[in-house]
Image: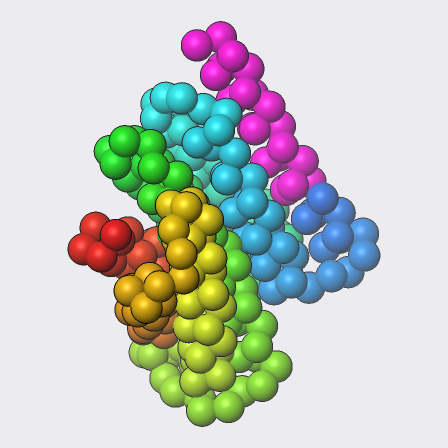
Amino acid sequence: MREDILNTFILAGLFLALFGVAELLHHGFNIKADHTRKIVHACTGMLTLLFPVMLGNHWLVLLLCSAFALILIASMRYNLLKSINAIDRPSVGSIAYPVAVYGCYLAFEHFEQQYLYFYLPVLTLAICDPIAASTGKKWAVGRYKVGRSSKTMMGSGMFFLSAFVLVSFLSIVLTEGAATNEVLLRAGIIAFIAAVSEGFSRNGYDNLTIPASVLLCMMFFV
């Protein structure tokens, strides 16, 4: 337990350092908040991969996630952490992210600590979502509207392709299986549903809907 508490402080320090680097990039090097936000999004996903390895208790995960949710709420209330919050659209993504991570850790515990139940939804969010946003913005092909938000078929397509590769790879590596037709079909279904979930989510709610859709699919297909 003492080691878990020490690891909690180490992880908290790493997250705070990440926020500090993002602020430095934004204020010191004039990097736009859209870019620093994506950096934080991806790096946060990478850091959370340490949770199943370093933390053996979901209460400590809840403590970390709650603390950072409160920090992010306060930053929005008092106009702080502009490297994350200074974007030109309403978003609950910063708050939804820690909620999603804690939910994924609960799933990991519930399914007898099978790493796939944590790593797959977290990495789908951390990797595929930024890929979709970046490619959709650079090559705005097939634009469509979700409420007042604008998405592109290019972005959704790249989300699907990257998610398909990710799901296939992790399914094979973490279950020590082979690239059978069944595995690839399952990967395609999960990637498609996650892509649809991302495509129809707006205002940052994809930080919840993407991992939730991946977890629900895994409960049916894995």
- In the image shown, does 197 or 32 lie closer to the viewer? 197
Residue drawn 34% across the image and 26% down it = 58
* Farthest residue, direction top: 2
Vertical arrangement, residue 152 with respect to residue 169, above or below: below
Segment colored magenta: 1-20
Which quadrant of the structure image shows residue 107?
A: top left
107 relative to 169 in the view: left or right: left
Vertical arrangement, residue 94 with respect to residue 156, above or below: above
Q: Main SS of the magenta segment?
A: helix
Vertical arrangement, residue 177 with respect to residue 55, above or below: below
From the top left corner, tell me how far across and down residue 153 is, in percent. Answer: 43, 85
What colouring method underlies this structural image? rainbow
* Farthest residue, direction left: 220
Residue drawn 25% across the image and 52% down it = 222
Confirm whether residue 11 shows in the render: yes
Confirm whether residue 71 shows in the render: no
Quick one: quadrant of the N terminus? top left
Vertical arrangement, residue 216 with respect to residue 162, above or below: above
* Farthest residue, direction right: 29
How many numbered markers are drawn? 0
From the top left corner, tell me how far across and down residue 96 is, in percent. Answer: 38, 49
103 relative to 174 in the view: left or right: left
Asked if the stretch drawn in magenta spans residue 215, the answer is: no
- In the image shown, does 103 or 22 lie closer to the viewer? 103
- In the image shown, does 5 or 53 lie closer to the viewer? 53
Residue drawn 40% across the image and 56% down it = 178
Asked if the stretch drawn in magenta spans residue 9, the answer is: yes
From the top left corner, tell me how far across and down residue 30 is, in percent. Answer: 77, 60
Residue drawn 45% across the image and 91% down it = 142
Which quadrant of the structure image shows residue 115?
A: top left
